[in-house]
Image (tube, coloured by chain):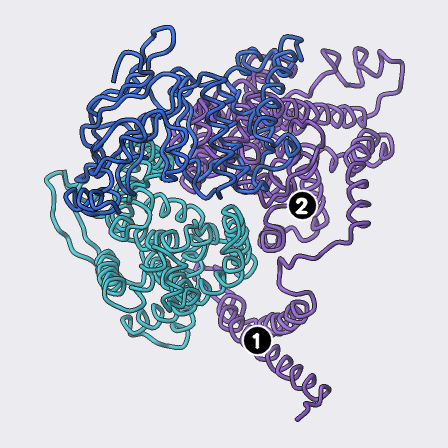
Chain colours: A purple, B blue, C cyan
Amino acid sequence: MSVNPAASEKASRIPGVAFIFKKALISALVALVLFSLMIGVRTEAGPSGQLIYWTRFDDLAAMVATVFGGSIVVELLRQWWGPVGTVRVVPPPVQDALAVAGRWVAPVLLIFTFLVPVIFYNERYILDLGILVLTYVMLGWGLNVVVGLAGLLDLGYVAFYAVGAYSYALLATNFGLSFWVCLPLAGILAAFWGVLLGFPVLRLRGDYLAIVTLAFGEIIRLVIINWQSLTGGPNGVTGIPRPTMFGIPLSPGEDGLAARLGIEFSPTHRIVFLFYLILALALLTNWVTIRLRRLPIGRAWEALREDEVACRALGINTTTTKLTAFATGAMFGGFAGAFFATRQGFISPESFTFQESALVLAIVVLGGMGSQLGVALAALAMIGGFELFRGLDQYRMLVFGVAMVLLMIWRPRGLVGHRAPTVFLERNQAISSDLVKEGHG
Amino acid sequence: MNDGDILSVEHLTMRFGGIVAVNDLSFGAERRQITALIGPNGAGKTTVFNCITGFYKPTSGAMKLTHDDGRGIQLERLNDFRISKQARVARTFQNIRLFPGMTALENLMVAQHNALMRASGLTFLGLIGAPSWRRAETRAIDLARTWLERIGLLGRADDAAGNLPYGDQRRLEIARAMCTEPALLCLDEPAAGLNARESAALSELLLAIRTDHGTSILLIEHDMSVVMEISDRVVVMDYGVKIAEGTPREVRDDPKVIAAYLGADEEEAIAVMESGT
Amino acid sequence: MDYFAQQLINGLVLGSIYGLIAIGYTMVYGIVGMINFAHGDIFMIGGFIALITFLILVSFGLTVIPVILLIVLLVSMAVTALYGWTVERIAYRPLRHSFRLAPMLSAIGMSFVLINYSQVAQGARVKPVPPIITGGYTLHEGSGGFVVQLSNIQIVVVITTVVLLALFTWLVARTRLGRDMRACEQDQTMAALLGVDVDRTISMTFVIGAALAAVAGMMYLLYYGLVDFFMGFVAGIKAFTAAVLGGIGSLPGAMLGGLAIGLIETLWSAYFSVEYKDVAAFSILIIVLIFLPTGLLGRPEVEKV
């Protein structure tokens, strides 16, 4: 008895429609329950202090409908694309083309970055955005040493950023030291705190390590807020001096750089200077990291991430290895913090919340841990993406959160899916991320 | 045990709560010889290894490592990484512990960490690219290359260690341990999971290590062909105690040993042996 | 002495609230090995749901307090449990077999979503409520004029906590679900092979944890008289500190840890400084983990070499 293929195909598609419809209905029902009180009802403190509320059933209906529709779309996509993580075989010629293109991304990006102040000289907004992106690139590269290379899960990186910023701010406003003197001091102080953080977490693994570093970050923030006599508390530190070109101020006056060079002064000069300053700091971070990777200490970091027990069996002192990783990452965070203070002219504890640590961590993970280029691209994507949502300030955290969830589901190993070996005999072959461990602590 | 021993274990006892894993064990490993530690599963062999290599702190007992120049080191007083660094005892693991995300070459470079750290002037000379550092790095790569060649993996030096076939991984782990230039090499079931051809290659490698490098070897092994072929000395354990010691032949014919492996008792074993079966 | 006794009472009540939240953390960590960063915010959502339900009931003219409280409790537990279930389904289940950082970052993302969601949905300002349960008992009148009091709301919190704890311990020890949970904690693959519905068991773990957090949220609302969108973040860290202190994976440990943190926080604010009370709690976490890397009652992990 032959089966009519057309009929059986139709039969196999109809349950599909019913299935999708049922799923969407369930999702909408769940959404209804979830949103009924939180969105359907809006509470607020009334004029005389008591609590009042009003209903927003139209908003509720809209949200539920969106969930219903969105659910259908997601199901259709899933049927069409296959489940998340399906390996798609890329044809070899495309693979080769991508590999060639991949080698060009980094140099092209670098050249473009150098030229940004030239191209966008008059667009203050773009220059500021560039400075912001580069700051986060540097923070990402700094945290990359700890999380990406050494596999130590640090959720409190913002603490070192804060130490660097406040070190410069307080040294400059209290002792009049110049930026160039304070910069290494900020790094040293931050590195010192990095070692201090490292000691308690030496024996901790994975999630415990994460929560202690988070607690550390919070402690630093709370101390900053509450030690008013030292840090100015919630009001922060103001009047932080701007950086000078090795002693020559960038001001309109007679002794300013513009006057010395014989060109007309413009406030853009300072912005451009800041741009190249952060670019230089970031490139320094990058250069040091790349060199350290090829030195025994960097290789020990990566080996630590791969297998700590094997490291001990090879005579590697895992304690100093971990502490140097923390210290180095912290140092770069401190440099970035000092830059941040001088760029803003004013700092307050509000800039050093857990959200910042999470953002930098997201940049590192999204970039594909350990990959310098990946981290840079991720910073560009996230900070640039954030700027796109400028108008929806209220929803920024929401979008960031959703983006993080989606990115983890889609590409948990990050954008750059491979690791570059530090030494090779014949072929410099990238190692797939699937083989690279993420570290146990 | 005699004065020629590189390693002498005396009255080693290891207790985990109420369980006595190793009970008053004493034996010696001779210099530049291959000593095998065998016994049924659960006999406590890996525990002994972990004590010797610093992963467990023994409940009581002493383990003395004597270098060629006569210097003696009490292993029970050293902690984890120092055993490799100062006492020059290297080991491999039952479940291979390579660095899977690093290439074979990189694995061997990591093994030379301490020497390279010194040469890089605690990193600073390395950062500035000093010639002395560059020379040290080249030497390290050459040593790695030599070992890769010896284990037949030179062509796969740049492949990720995690991608190598099982037998290659085992040999790479041994090569990595040798790159630390140890006086005593401890191998935990190096032949596990290897087929006959691979076992033969392993035996050849270990014999070469003993003869050409003069490295003493202590190994745990279940594969009797390997044990019989390469060991100079065999120590047999069961239930945490030593039940026999001697040359491979002596141990093979020892009824106590046979009984232990068969799970029978000694009289039965003697009866079976005498009946000529 | 009286002052100390009062602080003791206050600390234990606060600690009970932390303990209820901590149980959720420890259960989830025990079964799927992840820190549910969004759990503190589930507690916050529970508080909000309780607030809104209460408001609606009162405006409908209900005046019998115990009835109101019961309805609020049930509604809050049910809706918040659904939140917990949804979060697990959307953000964690797809990542269950992924590498360890992925669920953690997803959880952090989810935490931001929940915080911002309540901020947007209900406005950024703190929402106060008048005291619902009033009155109490004077325990002791000291010579210095200081009165040691035990308020009714404090009694309610402690009793609710004790009842729930007993219920929950029974659930884990005696019921089928409890057995399945313990099996999944030990070996998920084997449990699945033996017929345990692992997905459902894990979902139920999140659901129960969320329900308990909802109760904590409601208790917080009754006790402190307010909710705000950020209360989950700090409470979450402290509750997780409590869970770790008591030993992650240990239920009595979570409650013990919660009480400890509540006491430390209250005593520190009373005798030293209010501003640094959170610093005290976090520092305790760090100090404990230095000496006891697996917490007070945790099972020591022996790494197999």
Residue furthest top as drawn = B69
Mark 1: secondary structure = helix
In the image shown, does B91 or A59 lie closer to the viewer? B91
Q: Which residue is mark 1?
A: A23
Above or below for C27 versus A244: below
In the image shown, does C179 or A379 lie closer to the viewer? C179
Residue furthest front as drawn = B276
Task: Quadrant for the C terminus of chain A, please.
Answer: top left
Q: Hey, which quadrant is residue B32 in on the image?
A: top left
Foreground: disc 2 or disc 1: 2
Above or below for B36 versus A256: below
Residue furthest bottom as drawn = A1
Residue A164 showing in the rendered view: no
Task: Tell me: C99 left or right of A247.
Answer: left
Report the chain holding disc 2: A
In the image shown, does B144 or A137 lie closer to the viewer? B144
Q: Residue at the location (64% across, 39% down)?
A: A431
Count up the numbered dots: 2
x, y percent for residue C231? 43, 50
Q: Amino acid at mark 2?
A: Leu
x, y percent for residue C134? 26, 60
Residue A331 showing in the rendered view: yes
Report the chain holding disc 1: A
User: Marks 2 and 1, Cα distance to the nearest angstrom?
Assistant: 31 Å
